[in-house]
């Protein structure tokens, strides 16, 4: 039996691993070290400060924003995938949605934020339309720069992202399963409850994770809509590129390390949940 | 148990006519096979019976009750699909139990029924595996058990053996037959494999282009095909020109009474086992190939006007080789022929 | 499927469609119509539309510079992604399928590190050793490649799996081909669909990416747009809309190319 790692494997894998190592692992480890050595000496002060006061608030805000937009986006994205699975007419709908989702999922914050400002910002088109009908958005407390405003804008890329993740799984639901259930006397609801949804859960969890990570780290949209907001990515940037005060940079590294830890833990959590809910799956 | 009557069924998909004036009766407890090439409408007929498709015209009756508009879940049928019958997120046992839970069976009754079914289909040791852990044959047996669990009025099988290996196919086919006879459930079996159809069915319906060409017990279908299509589709066929000879027809070396399937039919349907082959240096035909098939030996013979296929019992086979000159004749015990058009 | 469910589905799709379409509409209106929203009345609805603002932008030298850089980054990112990933993906599929889970995990890791953090980390690492690297706008390429990893790897991996790369490889080996020949003349030509998918996704990412570029203080198309928007709101909006549509067009072309080969985005593993 050949050695597990022969020359071809090494030659091919090395550039890739070197690349990832150089541009991802090394910098991250460097950051981690800096986080634990505030002011040059080993200590937890930076890590601790990163969890207090405004930084704590920022974490909570970012977490709420990420969780909310992920759950909402996740459910809506799943519903979109399910709606389009069974729809054969009009023919252009499916391919348009596929293409549009690929664009929308990657949508940088700039055009997106602009679009929403143009639509429901204070000078927005829809704002104006609604005011003609007598509905004042601003009055009801809605604002693009506040929490729910951000959630709405985030949904614009969260929903397509979930759609893209779920379509393969939804497409993999064989029609024979639904037909077999019907022949056995099952109502559609029972089929969904007992067969289809359980089958979709692992992919759904994976999608939620992707959405969560994506929105927690989202920078551009928040930057445009509310540069001063208390969100983790914005804070990190402020600490690192605003007026540089020694000590503050270490703080930024600490926040980064906490963020990475949080995201890694979510990753592990979801992986465990996926394993649990997919007992029946083949590897 | 129930008698199935599908009457005057018509089904179009866009501009394609899948079924035109399709009529089929399945007696209670009978196993009828629908046989035909892909696109002939056999699967459409099954799906209309199951309720997955709605006929454009015609009625479906089961046990005297008109079920044309009855939704699928209320028909109380059982069905086995070609593939992916079982729910992947449930064990074999859970799959079967699902059928029983839907019919509101109590837990004790469920347990008894499941155990009995698993025993009948020989699956007791595989019951707690997930579908992906089972072989194709095991999956289809569990699917069969599940289909029978709720004591259905009609059992539907949509090419259940097509995705299986050859050996598994044969044994599972026998098992389906055995179980079906034991339980006595009215059954519709769809397949494109004529060996399967002939081996398993009480009657076989041969379909082509949305129409039922002939429905008869297997032997009648084989020996008295009603059309050129059926003759060619079921079993191997030699088409030999026949000359009228009084009230008989002359084929090769003999004259025999014949039935024409249509006016002007002059090609005789001769099955391979109806030919006799004599090695004769003066013969005008040549052996092209000798194929050993176990109990039979098949000779492929070139002659003027085409190729003939003759099956001889290996035990009686004299031993011709490729290249030998032979004389082909009609066996003496052939006393009846079918004529088809060219 | 019940009629109630069908109606609900239609309503849902229409609402969602509005949600995605209306902001674009609003953007277009703002960009191309010179009537301020406050003064907008039904009579004035068709007044003041012009594409002039957009064309002005095209003539802006900064815009042209930024676009050129973005396009170059896009090409480089695609090339490097393919050069780095294709061999590895092929290797995993053909010789080392046990590494697949590890690879999927590795490619997901870049998303765990926020762009901000990554930029800082890389800057800190390189500032002391090769400062010139960060000064060049091309320093963005590694970030883009990393950031696109989850999608590009998935697309390539799915492509390899769907063509049965291992069987192709073994068949070609029996015929006497070298590994290099196989990859270049057998595997890659059969993977064009997946390669297109990976490239198209990377392209969309580069054209829309703001965070890395802004943090490294580079002038790419997105950063130019953000800056430009401040001074020329309407023209900036027009530009943003055009870029979005251009990106959509690129992806649509990619999807069409996939369809011609009988695949869709699902087959490409997106």
Image (tube, coloured by chain):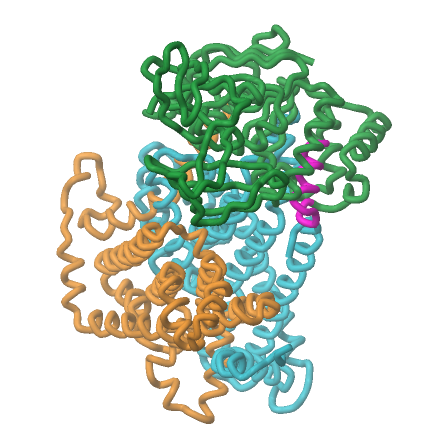
Chain colours: A cyan, B green, C orange
Above or below, comparing residue B138 to residue A48 in the picture:
above
Above or below, comparing residue A247 to residue B334 in the picture:
below
Magenta-colored stretch includes residue A185: no
Q: Identify the magenta region.
A: B131-145
- On screen, residue C35 versus residue B306, left or right, reads left
- Observer-nearest of C241 and B219: B219
**Can you give x and y, in whole percent of width and height, for residue C41 in the image?**
22, 37
Q: Main secondary structure of the magenta part?
A: helix
**Can you give x and y, in whole percent of width and height, for residue B245 in the image?**
37, 15
Above or below, comparing residue B304 to residue C150 in the picture:
above
Magenta-colored stretch includes residue B140: yes
Q: Residue furthest bottom?
A: C129
Q: Residue furthest top?
A: B64
Instruction: Place residue A177 in its image quadrant.
Output: top right
**Can you give x and y, in whole percent of width and height, for residue A37 in the image?**
63, 86
Above or below, comparing residue B162 to residue A73 in the picture:
above
- Observer-nearest of B225 and A82: B225
Instruction: Place residue C229 in its image quadrant.
Output: bottom left
- Where is the N terminus of chain B found, in terms of image quarters? top right
């Amino acid at each position: 039996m050949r050695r597990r790692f022969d020359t071809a494997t090494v030659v091919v894998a090395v550039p890739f691993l070197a690349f990832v190592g150089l541009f991802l692992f090394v910098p991250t480890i460097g950051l981690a070290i800096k986080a634990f050595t505030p002011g040059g000496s080993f200590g937890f002060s930076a890590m601790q400060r990163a969890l207090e006061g405004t930084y704590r608030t920022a974490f909570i805000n970012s977490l709420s924003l990420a969780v909310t937009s992920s759950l909402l986006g996740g459910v809506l994205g799943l519903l979109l995938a399910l709606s389009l699975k069974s729809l054969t007419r009009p023919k252009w709908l499916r391919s348009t949605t596929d293409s549009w989702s690929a664009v929308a999922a990657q949508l940088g914050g700039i055009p997106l934020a602009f679009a929403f400002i143009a639509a429901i910002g204070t000078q927005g088109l829809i704002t104006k339309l609604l005011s003609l009908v007598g509905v004042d958005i601003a009055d009801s407390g809605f604002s693009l720069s506040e929490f729910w405003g951000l959630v709405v804008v985030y949904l614009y890329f969260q929903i397509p992202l979930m759609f893209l993740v779920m379509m393969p799984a939804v497409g993999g639901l064989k029609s024979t399963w639904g037909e077999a259930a019907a022949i056995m006397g099952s109502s559609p609801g029972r089929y969904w409850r007992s067969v289809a949804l359980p089958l979709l859960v692992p992919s759904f969890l994976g999608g939620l994770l992707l959405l969560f990570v994506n929105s927690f780290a989202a920078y551009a949209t928040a930057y445009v809509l509310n540069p001063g907001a208390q969100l983790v990515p914005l804070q990190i940037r402020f600490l690192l590129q605003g007026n540089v005060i020694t000590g503050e940079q270490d703080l930024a590294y600490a926040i980064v390390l906490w963020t990475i830890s949080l995201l890694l833990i979510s990753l592990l959590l979801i992986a465990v949940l996926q394993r649990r809910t997919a007992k029946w799956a083949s590897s | 148990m129930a008698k199935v009557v599908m009457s005057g069924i018509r089904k179009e998909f866009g501009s394609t006519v899948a079924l035109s004036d399709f009529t089929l009766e399945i007696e209670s407890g009978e196993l009828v096979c629908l046989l035909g090439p892909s696109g002939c409408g056999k699967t459409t007929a099954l799906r209309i019976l199951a309720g997955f498709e709605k006929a454009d015209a015609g009625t479906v009756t089961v046990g005297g009750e008109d079920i044309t508009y009855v939704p699928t879940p209320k028909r109380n049928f059982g069905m086995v699909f070609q593939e992916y019958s079982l729910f992947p997120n449930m064990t074999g046992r859970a799959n079967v139990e699902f059928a029983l839970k839907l019919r509101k069976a109590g837990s004790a009754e469920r347990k008894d029924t499941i155990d009995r079914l698993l025993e009948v289909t020989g699956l007791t040791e595989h019951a707690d595996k997930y579908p992906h852990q089972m072989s194709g044959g095991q999956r289809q047996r569990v699917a069969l058990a599940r289909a029978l669990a709720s004591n259905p009025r009609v059992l539907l099988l949509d090419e259940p053996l097509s995705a299986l290996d050859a050996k598994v196919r044969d044994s599972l086919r026998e098992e389906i037959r055995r179980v079906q006879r034991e339980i006595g459930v009215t059954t519709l079996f769809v397949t494109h494999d004529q060996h399967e159809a002939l081996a398993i069915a009480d009657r076989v319906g041969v379909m082509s282009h949305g129409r039922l060409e002939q429905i008869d017990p297997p032997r009648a279908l084989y020996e008295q095909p009603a059309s050129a299509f059926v003759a060619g589709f079921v079993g191997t066929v030699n088409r030999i020109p026949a000359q009228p000879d009084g009230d008989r027809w002359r084929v090769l070396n003999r004259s025999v009474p014949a039935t024409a399937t249509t006016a002007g039919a002059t090609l005789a349907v001769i099955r391979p086992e109806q030919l006799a082959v004599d090695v004769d240096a003066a013969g005008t035909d040549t052996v092209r190939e000798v194929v050993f098939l176990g109990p039979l030996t098949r000779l492929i013979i070139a002659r003027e006007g085409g190729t003939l296929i003759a099956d001889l019992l290996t035990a009686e086979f004299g031993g011709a080789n490729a290249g030998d000159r032979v004389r082909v004749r009609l066996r003496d015990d052939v006393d009846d022929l079918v004529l088809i058009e060219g | 499927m019940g009629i109630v469910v069908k109606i609900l589905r239609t309503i849902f799709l229409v609402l969602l469609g509005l949600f995605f379409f209306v902001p674009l509409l609003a953007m277009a209106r703002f960009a191309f119509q010179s009537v301020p929203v406050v003064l907008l009345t039904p009579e004035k609805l068709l007044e003041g539309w012009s594409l002039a603002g957009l064309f002005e932008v095209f003539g802006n030298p900064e815009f042209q510079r930024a676009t050129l850089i973005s396009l170059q980054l896009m090409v480089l990112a695609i090339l490097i992604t393919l050069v780095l990933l294709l061999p590895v993906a092929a290797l995993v599929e053909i010789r080392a399928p046990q590494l697949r889970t590890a690879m999927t995990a590795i490619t997901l890791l870049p998303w765990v590190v926020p762009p901000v953090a990554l930029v800082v980390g890389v800057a800190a690492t390189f500032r002391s050793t090769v400062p010139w690297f960060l000064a060049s706008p091309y320093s963005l390429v590694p970030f883009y490649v990393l950031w696109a990893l989850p999608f590009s790897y998935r697309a390539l991996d799915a492509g390899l799996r769907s063509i049965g790369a291992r069987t192709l490889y073994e068949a070609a080996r029996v015929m006497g081909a070298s590994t290099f020949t196989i990859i270049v003349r057998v595997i890659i030509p059969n993977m064009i669909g997946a390669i297109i998918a990976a490239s198209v996704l990377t392209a969309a990412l580069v054209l829309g990416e703001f965070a890395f570029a802004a943090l490294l203080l580079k002038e790419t198309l997105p950063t130019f747009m953000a800056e430009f928007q401040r001074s020329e709101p309407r023209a900036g909006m027009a530009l943003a809309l055009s870029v979005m549509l251009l990106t959509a067009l690129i992806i649509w072309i990619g999807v069409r190319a996939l369809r011609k080969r009988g695949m869709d985005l699902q087959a490409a593993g997106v």
